[in-house]
Amino acid sequence: MRQIQPDLWETQVETPLPGLTTHAYLLIREHGNVLFYNSGLRDEIEKMAELGGVGYHYLSHRDEIGETLNLVAQRYGSKLGAHVAERAEVARIREPDILVDRRGRYPGDVEAIPTPGHSPGSTCFLVSSPHGKRYLFTGDTLYRAADGGWKPGFIPGFSRVDDISPLARSLELLRGLEPDVVIGSAFGGQAGFEELSPEDWPGRVDFALEALSRLEVDQRSRSPG
């Protein structure tokens, strides 16, 4: 693990599928550390003990489901959180303790923001650090591409045309936030996060919305009828 902020640690990179790279992130909190996303690396999960373990474990969407959900819970007694729309899929591995059903504050002092589009239960998380920064965990709703730009989580060949409208609404919602550090789950290039000024953030989201608009034109032109 490596430290990327005074209270935030990043696990080693994983490549669960060709061309797909991911990290998980551990937020250090006095009353229980918070793990965002998931890691399949057992050594990394064990290293979390040195940082105080895991009190709460939040998934941004169903692609993060894996057997290590049980390992984290059994090793640290952590509470697992996921969106209610994906409860059944998560429960095939482990029944969630915390179900997100609306925007609000959840255990671990985490603001969960449902952002459907990449998947029905995609959820972003916003937390305020005592060190003065606001961290936005975007899951795959927005991911950092190889060129460093942020792109929408619409995957041609996997996503449906009907996913475009909810994803666009989710991006518009995120545009109104003022994060200092934005942290995706999957990513391309060298890093899955970016530190930026809140004034820069709307432009990053506009870039993603423009890309999504182009994708919509392309996908609808390919649709029968």
Image (cartoon, rainbow, N blue to C red):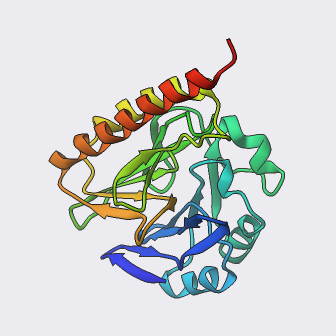
- Whether residue 111 is visible, yes or no, is no
Q: Residue at x 43, y 76 (%)?
A: 9
- Classify 176 as above or below 198: above
Q: Nearer the viewer, residue 154 or 34?
A: 154
x and y percent of residue 104 in the render? 45, 37
Whether residue 127 sits left or right of residue 90 in the image: it is left
Whether residue 86 sits left or right of residue 211 in the image: it is right
Q: Nearer the viewer, residue 154 or 124?
A: 154
- Whether residue 74 is visible, yes or no, is yes
Residue at the extreme right: 92
Whether residue 34 sits left or right of residue 157 in the image: it is left
- Classify 97 as above or below 171: below
x and y percent of residue 96 in the render? 71, 50
Number of numbered discs visible in the structure rendering: 0
Q: Residue at x 54, y 40 (%)?
A: 154
x and y percent of residue 26 in the render? 48, 70
- Classify 115 as above or below 2: above
x and y percent of residue 112 in the render? 47, 43
Q: Residue at x 68, y 71 (%)?
A: 72
Quarter of the image with the C terminus is top right
- Classify 24 as above or below 90: below
Q: Nearer the viewer, residue 87 or 164?
A: 164
Q: Residue at x 56, y 50 (%)?
A: 60
Q: Nearer the viewer, residue 149 or 113?
A: 149
